[in-house]
Amino acid sequence: MLRDIGVSSFEDLLTAVPSHLRLGRPLNLPAGKSEFEVKSIMTKLAKRNANTVDSISFLGAGSYDHFVPSAVNTLAGRSEFATAYTPYQPEVAQGTLQVIYEFQSMISELFAMEAANASLYDGGSALAEAVMLACAQTGRKKVLCPQNVNNLYVGATRTLVTPMGLAVEPLAIKDGAVDVAELTKKLDDTVAALILQYPNFLGRIEDIEPLIKRAQSMGALSIVIADPMAMGVLEAPGHLGADIVVGEGQALGNYQSFGGPYLGLFATKGNLVRRMPGRIAGVTKDVEGRRGFVLTLQTREQHIRREKATSNICTNEGLCASRATFFMSMLGPQGLKDVGDACLKRCAYLRKKLAEVSGVRLSFDGAHFKEFSFSLSKDPEQFVEFMAKRGILAGVPLRWFQLGMDDAILVAVTENRTLEEISQYVSGVRAFMGGQE
Amino acid sequence: MSSRQPQTLQSETKLIFELSAPGRAGYDAPETSGELASVQLPAFRKRTVAPRLPEVTENLAVRHYTNLSVRNHHIDRDFYPLGSCTMKYNPKINDELAALRGFGSIHPLQPYSTVQGAFELLDMLSKALLEVTGMDAITLQPAAGAQGEMTALLMFRAYHIKNEGHPRKRVIIPDSAHGTNPASIAIAGYEVTELKSGADGLTDLNALKAALGPDVAALMITNPNTLGLFESRIKEIIDLVHAAGGLVYMDGANLNALMGISRPGDMGFDACHMNLHKTFSTPHGGGGPGSGPVAIKRHLEPFLPRPVLTRQSEQYYWDWKRPDSIGNVHTFFGNFGMHVRALTYILSLGGNGLKEISENAILNANYLRVKLRDAYEVPHDRPCTHEVILSGDRQKAKGAKTLDIAKRLLDYGIHPPTVYFPLIVHECLMIEPTESESRETLDEFVDVMLRIDKEITENPELLKQAPYSTPVRRLDEAGAARNLNIRYQPPA
């Protein structure tokens, strides 16, 4: 091959690399291993982690143990979906493009919005992009964010938007919900948008329609962070007037995977479509009149518009969005409602049972979807360690989230939890409170 | 009942919504009965109109998506020389290991004592990537290359603010830069200064000197660059920027050319990102998920996204107390599923294997350069690295453009190279074969490219109507934007 290239040694191909920049030694990494050895090493690492299949998980706070039907894995495992790339040549990417179109359609339906994109990285970056859009659309530079919005989402948003001169201003909460008096005080014509999480980070279902209307009355947009799994039972944000809906799609057929890869959802009203970040697939015809799909409105994107693009995103979360599409198609409207009911009931049941244990205090009254917070008259992190020994991942201590709720725990109860498992949780709490080992 | 016609791969598909019928379902939610069912719920606003998701059985859904999948070109099907994307073979062991319950089914906020295996994996990956890049510290948080670029720019910004009290104003990029570079610069709050490349395709040092000043925060550069050429004077370039008080960032998209040969850290870069879905074989997924770790020199360490992986007394934990951190960029800790795959790849290949990969990537690209140089113009006909740039100018003069060449390649079952990028080459074709391809595949590709050139000479019209045999033929992209339809509307 070197002969065909016309050089006598491989070194002749590296003449452009000056000798002082040549590494000049082997990489200080172990030699390559056989498949057998690699599997052995990696399996041992995996075994050192407690997992949510062998343990009973009540963990939430933005990542959830929802059921993944087997067929989702089968379809997502097909090389045709997994080893293709961005559909730059649409004629040989109709599989990917049609899946994206169906994904956009289903997400739009879920949230009752007019349009959705092909995905962003995760819920946090989707919120950041929504803030950027709202500020670009209104010409204002500040958004209001209640403190019951996921702190990690707010962090990711602040990281991104602060250098652009945009501000995310915190809004106080009262009894776990948006403080309407505070909102009224802070809402003025310098505010580009009001962010609302629905259900909120603490699991409560708030009545967001009046808050949305209030924001819009001052010329601000509403950005609703909505749980896609709640959309079978909760009124859709699009029917409540939301301008932009974002969310985390991990619950839709994707695994928890220690925090990634996840799936940023992004949907808007029709008038905001041309400002949307990310890829969008659209319908068209080919030269023989066949229906086909292409990436469209590409003049928003970095490969065309460069520094004037609506976002810098290129590679997004394609296969995760595909998994969500397969999942939603099998769930259907009835399945979504059934899962929603399952979460509502299980969550309410655990609340009821815990309230009967002395020393336990539920943080808030009112409707919760699939998670809620409670406090114990003992240390929450000790409680979590105690339960872990019993094979239960008991919840996320809220002192990690700077909410002033340092003695509380956020616990999630999804459709995957059985009555027996929930009862085990309650027994565990009783045992901990009773001073047992 | 719809009447089925004789089928070809070009037969029109149905949408999943068009297969829907009331009452069908592909999923049985867990039962909610007995004590669970009778729980009272407080009031809340219920969904009034159900979402119009499809109602199909699992069988119908599986058939539908299986039939869609075969309409894709993909690496496991055939050659995919998409320049800058590094479409190498994706080893199957990667996916099998990422699916282990001890990796796929762990929650990001489990107690630290229950995820020490995951932490150790991240530590092993971090150390390996630092050795490959010659840098001091790393964040695995960014979910893709573009997010990595942005993360580095934000760290640069924080660095300047800490040292000088202000972020500075401009970031310099070459005119050959990937579109995400200027887009990331704008989002990081900087102005873009574009530098015209020299006639040799490399950075023009005089132009760089003229562009530098105390308001320049950074230079963002790809090495080897998007023409597949190694920046021989990179050390001088970096020294110039440092002397002006700026920092230098390497877009690591082309790392497949460098492993074991030369390292960004040794070149003097302050930061570089890597694309695990390019260089480190994690699958492209039809548009992600990816992963874009950013490696840095020590002076940028205080600004790393939080939390930072730390080890003390044999225990790993996340250090959230990082007062100078730019904050988090990903909600949690990055795309762990891709970290698992990348580490699997690195363990499988070892140091010797990674170097062989880069060497073969360079060999294959040069082979194509030499074999195609008679029929196609090679703007910079000297040893290239892992990708080679052609210009379709000669073919355009004969009546068919690069776009038409790309569309005709589809008929031969080969994915076209990247076209019309970088912008500085007319009728550009950017070919990156990767190390995965055998000589037979490369020879076949050369043969096809020569055949296409002959087709242009004899009958350019043939190309202008291509492709003929793909699932759809040329699509009306202008029409798609004009008559915008980006979601299915069920009939009223």
Image (tube, rainbow, N blue to C red):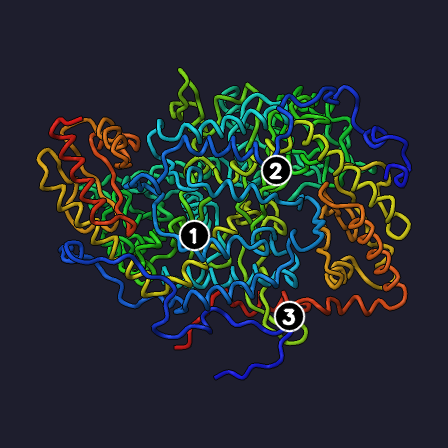
Residue type, mark 3 in image: Leu
Residue type, mark 2 in image: Phe
Residue type, mark 1 in image: Leu
**Rendered-image quadrant of the C terminus of chain B:** bottom left
Asked which secondary structure carries label 3, the reply is loop
Q: Chain of mark 3?
A: B
Q: Position of residue A416 (x, y in %)?
A: 30, 50
As measured in the structure, the alpha-carbon distance from the residue carrying label 1 to the one carrying label 3 is 32 Å
Q: Are marks 2 and 3 in contact (CB under 8 Å)?
A: no
Indicate which disc residue B9 carries.
Answer: 3
Q: Quadrant of residue B322?
A: top left
Q: Quadrant of residue A412?
A: top left
How packed mark 1 is, by other alpha carbons closer than 10 Å (few <14, some 14-19, many 20 or more), is many
Q: Chain of mark 2?
A: B
For label 2, the residue is B280
Asked which secondary structure carries label 2, the reply is loop
Camera-side residue of A218 and B461:
B461
For label 1, the residue is A265
Q: Earlier in the sequence, mark 2 or mark 3?
A: 3
